[in-house]
Amino acid sequence: MDHHDSDHHHSGWPLHESDSADAIGDLYSERVLGTARSRVPGLLAKEKCGTSEGTAGIQSRLKPEKKNMASYPISPHPPDETQKISDVASSQAATLRRHMSARNRFLFFLVAWLIVLMPFLFWWNTWFGRHLSDTQISEYLSDNKHPRHIQHALVQLGERMERRDASAATWYPELVLLASHPVEEVRNTDAWLMGLDTSYERFHATLLKMLKDSSTVVQGNAALSLVRFGDESGRAQIVALLQPARIVAPSAGLVVDVDHTGTSIHQGGLIARLQSGDYTTDVRSPISGRIQTLSIAKGASVAAGTEIAVVDPGVEQVWEALRALYLIGQVRDLPLIRIYERDSPEIPDRVRQQAVLTEKAIRQRATYRP
């Protein structure tokens, strides 16, 4: 325990300390020896004067050290009894140390409560499953300072649209406007939602425009949603979802940090970091998946446009693309689809099965078409 906490720990009361051994010795010698202390000097004086030896004189020569006995501290208890008293005192001191004041107990439980509460509040405020009222949805959709609020409202609207809740149509105009939002994640979620209700024609027109979005993932989600409208305009973007993403250096620089081959990575995850003078550039993955290859090493210099890495698409992206191609795929798409039919530990069974079904559907369409 720190010294500055000792007073609080014992509520201001001092610890019990045993009495001084010197004080006990003096009291006990006065009581046990009595006047013997005054007799010893007299006997010694007679010896120096050549007087006859008495019993006391003989004893003083045989035990000359006895003259100092009164000055030595003498324990009032046998050694074993003294040890017991010392153990009791130590036990009492340890008990007092373990005792915690009411103030310290309150602080302890307060800190423990906050340790549990703070992560819960953070999770509660960022959890997209938390129910929002109609008023909150309207407020969140217009909160451009907090993109996660917009995403939260979009997720809540998506749940209503999947339930065919007519109240969701109230915010359809806002969904159209969000197609041009500066944050990629917002546009990505928005493109997915607009495919949940094919009865709103403005969604169809907006999705066609989103096929030219700067993000390949947004393009892919827009193309997948267009399939629900029976529109094959985004087939090329869907086929691209099956292909690895090739990442190039946006500018020249020195590689100061780089990830590892085979690492799983999320969309926006850091692939490498380049430094040019005082400027640092982060190279991030445009898709979720796994790093297939890396063409650079830490400490190397790269030029702008140099290929840095190749990232294989994630399982969910591939699965959604295969499902869409089941409906609109063409024979020329089969070589890419067959890649996911092979027996590999990196390809889940459901993806492999979907690839087989997709090829079968494409071949059947090709057979029946004139």
Image (cartoon, grey):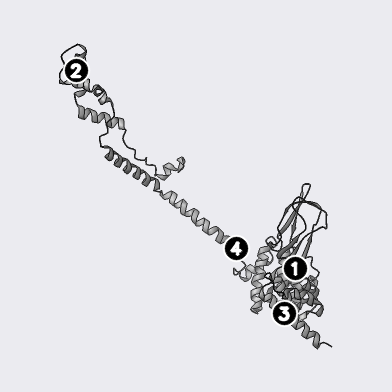
C-alpha gap between disc 2 and disc 4:
95 Å
Q: Would you say the residues marked 2 and 1 are in contact, meaning their CB atoms lie under 8 Å apart? A: no
- Residue indicated by mark 1: 217
Q: Which sits earlier in the primary sequence, circle 3 or circle 1?
A: 1
Dot placed on the residue nearer the N-terminal end, 3 or 2: 2
Q: Quadrant of the C terminus?
A: bottom right
Inter-mark Cα distance, 4 to 1:
27 Å
Q: For this view, does 336 lie left or right of residue 8?
A: right
User: Looking at the rendered structure, which numbered label has been put on residue 164?
Assistant: none
Q: Is residue 181 above or below residue 71?
A: below
The three-letter code of the residue at mark 1 reads Val
Query: Which three-letter amino acid code belongs to the residue tagged 2?
Result: Leu
Nearest to viewer (mark 4 / mark 1): 1
Badge nearest the viewer, 2 or 1: 2
Is disc 3 in contact with disc 2, using a CB cutoff of under 8 Å?
Answer: no
Q: Which residue is tagged 4?
A: 125
SS at mark 1? helix
**Of label 2 and label 1, which has the lower sequence position?**
2
